[in-house]
Amino acid sequence: MNVLLIFASMFLLMFLGMDIFVSMGLSATLYLLVTGNAPLTLIPQSMINGISGFSLLAIPFFMLAGDFMNVSGMTLRLVNFAKFFIGRIKGCLAYTCVFVNVVAAGISGSGPADCSAVSSVMLPAMKKDNYPDDFAAAANAASAVVGPIIPPSIPMVFIAMLTNLSVGKLLFGGLVPGIMMGAAMCVICWAKTRKMDLHEEDQENPTWTGFWAALKEAWLSLIAPLIIVVGVLTGFVTITEVAILAAAYVLFIGAVVYKTIKLRDIFHAFRGAALFSSSIMALFSIVGIFSWLIAVEEVGKTLAAAVLVWNLRPWMFLLLVNVWFLLMGMIMDAIPAMTIFVPVLLPIAEGLGIDPVHFGVVVVVNLMIGLLTPPVGGLLFVESKLSGVSFDRLSKAALPFLGALLVILLLITYVPQLVTFVPGLFF
């Protein structure tokens, strides 16, 4: 009954339009008032403890790195570098869109940030070459799903902080799935573009001179993801220090070398990172008290007992988890969904012998695919505004990409080595 009180009040407040952290906080307060299981002073104490972790600083600095990349012109340089290799292939701009999102993912770790940065460059170019506007928008939106999966990944960092799992293992657990998702989207691009009447200009045959010219233009941009990868793998620096180094590097290159980042841009980037991270910190501040309530009411034990009663096998449990988080991704943002459900479901997964890193990556992939599904579909809303394509048309055009991503989700769900292989090599 008390569990029903917690979740019913929380979802009612969310339905009425209150922010997630406010809904969670008020439902926790209502629980304490009704049950008297603990004094109300537990709430502020838990809020302070929830945001005292040093590792949380990685989130705003990854956001800063992404914002600095956007305004420094690194995205355009990456586009030109990619076109050097695939510019002679029909549909080259569609493939370039996927490639750049995969590389850009190694800097910002945010789907909407990558979507905004890459789309601002790719959409005008694709329009010029006669790509259908709904396909161009769908390709850009779908490619940005990879952003929060390939390291660095803000959702992976969030799950690590939430569950005390290894940040490095979670980050590199998403590497192979992210690459597979990129490859699957390239297949969809090939199937769609081979019959299009595109006006792409034939690029000159690749030469070593042209390669060195393209590399000279883009090599500083390509180093940014390497800083993050090498830093995490070597263990010389923490994930927070890696995020700070990446942000500082991109800022230095943009402001001093390229001279494209102005003082005004720095102010806007810091403001954006502060606003985004404050919403994350607000959620983390309330996670502690909410986790305590769930523990007191033994929600995890109740669900674990139900798993035993129903005789669920690991594959059945993972199937239910996929369905559940895909549904949650359709109606709510990823961070609140992880906050509410991962602490409850992870112990059950471990009890069934499921690798916790595998489980965490599967959850993130589910919720990131949710960015491409209505009615919430965060990437669809962002891309609709950027492209001018209606939300309905964009949702229909994104269906083939969505289908390909779901196939990859099933593969990583039931072939856990696709997730655990790379972390097992280095950690």
Image (tube, grey):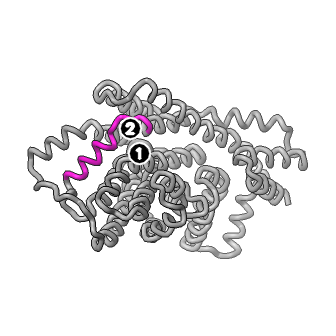
The answer, for residue 277, to whether it is visible in the render is yes
Is the Cβ of the residue at disc 2 closer than 8 Å to that at disc 1?
A: yes
Whether 275 is drawn above or below 408: the answer is above
Mark 2 and mark 1 lie on one chain; the one further toward the N terminus is 2
Q: Quadrant of the N terminus?
A: bottom right
Instruction: Give SS at disc 1.
Output: helix
Please state if 40 lies on the left or on the right of 69 as rendered.
right
Is residue 359 in sight in this rendering? no
Image location (x, y in percent) of residue 410: 47, 70
Q: Main secondary structure of the magenta part?
A: helix
- Please tell me which residue lies in front, 406 or 236: 406
Residue highlighted by disc 2: 69
Q: Position of residue 135 (x, y in %)?
A: 40, 64
Q: CA distance from mark 2 to mark 1?
A: 8 Å
Give the magenta part as a residue range. 67-84
Q: Which residue is mark 1?
A: 117
Q: Amino acid at mark 2?
A: Met
Residue appearing at x 41%, y 34% in the figure:
68
Q: Provide the secondary structure element on which disc 2 rests.
A: helix
Q: Residues within 10 Å of mark 2 (few under 14, many from 20)?
A: many
> The residue under label 1 is which amino acid type?
Ala
Q: Nearer the viewer, residue 136 or 98?
A: 136
Residue at the spot x=12%, y=46% of the render? 210
**Residue neighbourhood size for the residue with mark 1, other residues' Cα within 10 Å, grouped as few (<14), some (14–19), many (≥20):** many
Counting from the top left corner in percent of width and height, residue 382 is at 51, 52
